Amino acid sequence: MTTLTYKQVIRPRSRFRQILDTFGGYIRIDLVEERMFPAASLLRYVAVVFPVLLYYFQSTFLNMGDDLFTVMLIGTAVAAGLQEALTGLTNRLTYAQERGTLETYLVEPVPWALIPVAMNIWRSITGALLACIMVAIGVLLGAPIKLSAVPLALVVLFLGVVACNAIGTLAASFLILFKRGEPVISIYALAAGVLGGALFPISVLPGWIRWISYLVPHSYVISAERNLLMANPPATEYSTGAAIAILVIFCLVVFTGGLVIFDRSLKLARRLGILSV
């Protein structure tokens, strides 16, 4: 009779394998939720059609031309896509806290700093997909888009998604300790809605408030996308290269800092008895 040792029955996973399994596990959870509520999932994709139609008919009625329609189309698409990445993590954590399942997310033997990335990866992907769908619908309606610039535009959108994940991670740290993440997200959403330049270039803002837009990643993403995809983009205060460079720096600094703060927030919450793990 052969006796099997522990190592023969259960082989320890490498750190890389643990990370892949964690990502795959959270994606499977999201896919299960998508299948459980197909109507809600379908409506998320159908709903993005209406803003595009709204601005198309508005530009047609007011005889504003294709360029202005494209300005609003790109800004609205980027804002809608980044919203998913911005709120996905806090929404999931709030859902877990309300149902008492947050601790089950923390028992996986991976660094806690990895959890925000894994938990929000599917929402980030679907958010980027929503933005692409909106732009594609606009193209079908006659928006002049430079198709040759689409690959680089997708890179810029990815940087925007990472930047919003960074902000969402900071909000999640607040949520872990105080059970409320809305203040951080709400303040940023208000700033992005007015100062991100979704419906107009930030160059039209008065100087006394325009400087705040420099702190909002949305403004760089939207500006770069317009410069890349439009033949005649509106005047901006920075070039595409400058916008990309600022986004890269923002992602490296804020996302790294956000992951560290999230990890320490979980450890502090455990010491305070807020978490039972």
Image (spheres, rainbow, N blue to C red):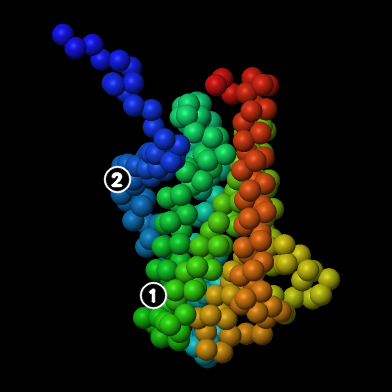
- Front in this rendered view, residue 170 or 137: 170
Give the amino acid type for the residue marked by disc 2 in the picture.
Arg
Q: Are marks 2 and 1 in contact (CB under 8 Å)?
A: no
Inter-mark Cα distance, 2 to 1: 25 Å
Identified at 33% across, 21% down, the residue is 7
SS for callout 2: helix
Depicted 91 relative to depicted 66: above or below = above
Residue found at x 37% / y 50%: 40
Answer few, some or many: residues within 10 Å of disc 1's Cα (few below 14, many 20 plus, some between 14 and 19). Answer: some
Q: Quadrant of residue 112?
A: top right
Name the foreground residue: 247 vs 35: 247
Left/right placement of residue 264 relative to residue 43 reads right
The residue at the point 47 percent across, 69 percent down is 154
**Residue found at the very far right of the displayed protein:** 208
Tag 2 residue: 35
Q: Residue furthest front?
A: 2
**The disc labelled 1 sits on which kind of residue?**
Ile
Q: Quadrant of the N terminus?
A: top left
**In the picture shown, does residue 41 fall above or below 103?**
below
Q: Is residue 3 above or below residue 111?
A: above
Q: Which numbered circle lies on residue 137?
A: 1
